Image (spheres, rainbow, N blue to C red):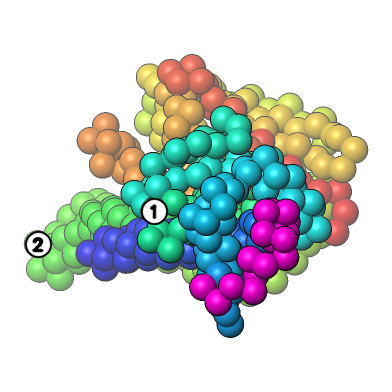
Amino acid sequence: MHSSRYKYVSIVSAVAVLLLLGLYMWMTYRSTTKDISERAEGQLSWAMFYESYSRAELVTEDDTLSLPQSRGNLSLASSVEGMNDALSQKYHSEISLDNVAMLVDSLLSVVHINRDVTLQMVDAGGKVLKQNNDRSTSWSIFTKPVSIRRDQSKAIRLALNNPYPELARRLSPLFLISAIILAFFAVIIIQLLRFITEQEQMAELRNDFSYAMVHDMKSPLSSIIMGAHFLHSGKVDDKPQIKEKYYTIIEDEAEHLLALVNKLLTISKLENKKLILNKNEIDLEPIINDLVEKAKTKANKPIEISTHLEVKNVLADEQYLTEAISNLIDNAIKYSKDEIQIDIKSFDTDKHVLLKVRDNGIGISKEEQQIIFDKFGRAAIHEKNRKGGVSGFGLGLNYVDQVMQAHGGKVTVSSEKDKFSEFTLYIPKSV
């Protein structure tokens, strides 16, 4: 299915974005730590130069720095290396880690780098020969070693033991922006996957709805065709009672199909906000009395309908409100038990007139209550209901819901399985 492909592409895209974002953040972290390390290395080189220069003045009587092999036009690192090699070989004067540490401390404070550091003397293989303290850990950031021998046999490096305040200060804006982007992208992906899933479910419901509609329209159409066939054959021309029966069947089934088509058209207009209601002050009592009489006539079980109307006048479109109430009564009969008991009552609230239709039928489960007002809601449980002998494909309650929304009100349901169902129409008092 295309939806499965879209899901796959969405997930792969999300993983790719996460990997790219993670790689970018890692590279930025590495770049920042490298920058801090190089800055600290520069201060270490100057501290070693000052320390070496101070020793040279003491032991050589101002002569060492003029030696070609120790100075020349050399870089800072080469000068440090040359001076320390010469001082060690000729004067047996070795560099002092403690003195370098004091100079490093001062220089790091100038460039705003955390001064919790450890100086380590290492050999050519990186093995630590000695250090000025033992505060360094595997989490420390290490500078490149600065050599103090021309044969590269000894060098000094700096371990930054707590670089994280500096890292946090420099990386927190990036991480914050990345987190926002990531959260935003995650929301988009989740919403996209949810939308795709909903579209899949809606497609399945539409298919079920189409099947249910065709199945339930097939029966009245078959009755009409069969009745027309018998009437056209002339076999019942001399049997007026049977002939009248077939005419009645054709008319009833044709009216049923017409009502179904009109209901579909009305729902479509309501959904597209194209239906104009003609609201007037109407009397509920004659409307409900007429519906009750029709219900008793159509019922094929013992039926009792009681009415208690505290409020009889409402502001509504008579045609559509009558149809909505009729749908609720029809549902009460359709989902009834062996004996039908329906209670209809109305009463007043601050902003609405409430009209309740309650039955003693099979009830509605909590799960089904969430979807019964959807256009395709009954289609999702149609097969189960059809096997149980219930016809129809669920436009009635969606029609009621759409009509009440068009009136500015709503419809709610309260039900217990195998006990009762009660539908409440909220009819606004004003436009």
Tell me the crowding category of disc 1: few under 14, some 14 to 19, or many 20 or more residues within 10 angstroms, Cα based: few
Q: Residue at x 72, y 65 (%)?
A: 62
Image coordinates of residue 252 in percent, x first then y, are: 36, 56
Of residues 383 and 178, the one drawn nearer to the viewer in this rendering: 178
Query: Label 1 vs label 2: CA separation?
Result: 121 Å
Left or right of 325 in this view: 12:
left
Q: Is residue 387 visible from the viewing direction of this image?
A: yes
Residue with the most extreme bottom position:
73
* Quadrant of the drawing holding the N terminus: bottom left
Against 377, residue 406 (above or below) is below
Of residues 33 and 146, the one drawn nearer to the viewer in this rendering: 146
Left or right of 325 in this view: 311:
right
Image coordinates of residue 156 in percent, x first then y, are: 52, 51
Amino acid type at circle 1 is Ser
Of residues 260 and 104, the one drawn nearer to the viewer in this rendering: 104
Amino acid type at circle 2 is Lys
Identify the residue position indicated by label 1 in the image: 153
Left or right of 200 in this view: 224:
left
Identify the residue position indicated by label 2 in the image: 235
* Quadrant of the drawing holding the C terminus: bottom right
Q: Secondary structure at mark 1?
A: loop
Q: Is residue 213 visible from the viewing direction of this image?
A: no
Q: Which residues are magenta?
A: 53-69
Residue 31 magenta-drawn? Answer: no
Q: Residue at x 63, y 66 (%)?
A: 64
Residue 63 magenta-drawn? Answer: yes
Image coordinates of residue 102 in percent, x first then y, are: 74, 45
Against 363, residue 239 (above or below) is below
Tell me the crowding category of disc 2: few under 14, some 14 to 19, or many 20 or more residues within 10 angstroms, Cα based: few
Label 1–label 2 contact, CB within 8 A: no
Q: Secondary structure at mark 2?
A: loop
